Image (cartoon, rainbow, N blue to C red):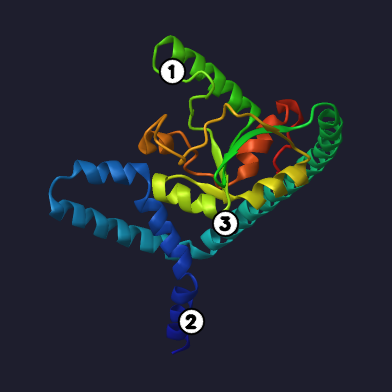
Amino acid sequence: MLSVVALVVYLIFFWKTTARVIKGVFRSDVVHKIGKGLKLPFLKGLLTLVLLLICGMVGYGLAPVLWAAYRYHDRKVAHEKRRRAEEQRLQAEKLRAERQAENKKRTRLQEEWFAENPRKLFFNTMGGVTAVLSPNALEAGEKETRYARLDGLWGHEKILKPTGETCLFVTIEGQGVVRKHLGERVSLRMLSGLHALVERHKVELCRDERIFVPAMSEAIMCFDDQAAGMISDMESSFDLLIAPQTPYDLRLLPEY
């Protein structure tokens, strides 16, 4: 009776070890190639049965030795994972500290740079609608307008052709006008958002009456074309209008 109980305990205790042997054999490239070479389902089934019997006998026969070997291997692998994780953690901390120091330095250099080269935004306002361009967008608009005039595609001397980089800030009145004429395709921000942006980042607002203000009339351009010349996805006004004005080598590095 005791021998039967001992056998059952043995089989249960070393089941995982034997199962691991079976999985290892069936996942091996040799067995996989042999299985692919057998075309008849009967032969494949027979191969599976024979391998199960052999693996079961070998696995249970050498279970104590295999259990110790697997345990040693697993501990070694776990130790290596912990070692690598600790190395990565220390490297990440080092890089994070370096980036924080670099960003602190760049923040100071940014302050010095913008003290001499203040950020600017160019705008024009009509009927509660304020069209805003960054310096880069204004330059691109001037260039595109010049080329369009040369090609005879733009005949308005005192108005810049919209380039798709115009951001709109509106009052309640202006919001209604834009939604009525341009629909929901155009992204809008309330006018207070522009002034908050200007105050927070010490931006110089410069009025430029050449900037086209949309939704006022169709005398210059049809409303559909006007909508195409406005920003349609303005999730962050800062990223569109302010961030690009920072020199590339002074921009803050992302946190690691």
Q: Residue furthest top?
A: 150
**Residue under the point 69% across and 53% down:** 82
Q: Please name which of the two marks, 1 or 2, marks the residue nearer to the observer.
A: 1
Residue matched to label 1: 155
Residue matched to label 3: 69
Q: Is residue 75 left or right of residue 65?
A: right
Image coordinates of residue 247 in percent, x first then y, are: 73, 27
Q: Is residue 98 left or right of residue 184?
A: right
How many angstroms separate mark 1 from mark 3 (CA)?
84 Å
Q: Quadrant of residue 120?
A: top right
**Residue under the point 76% across and 30% down:** 250
Q: Is residue 188 left or right of residue 179?
A: right
> Could you classify mark 1 by the number of other residues whose Cα lies within 10 Å: few (under 14), some (14-19), or many (20 or more)?
some
Residue 110 in the image: above or below residue 157: below
How many angstroms separate mark 1 from mark 2 (CA)?
99 Å
Q: Name the residue type under label 1.
A: Gly
Residue 18 in the image: above or below residue 135: below
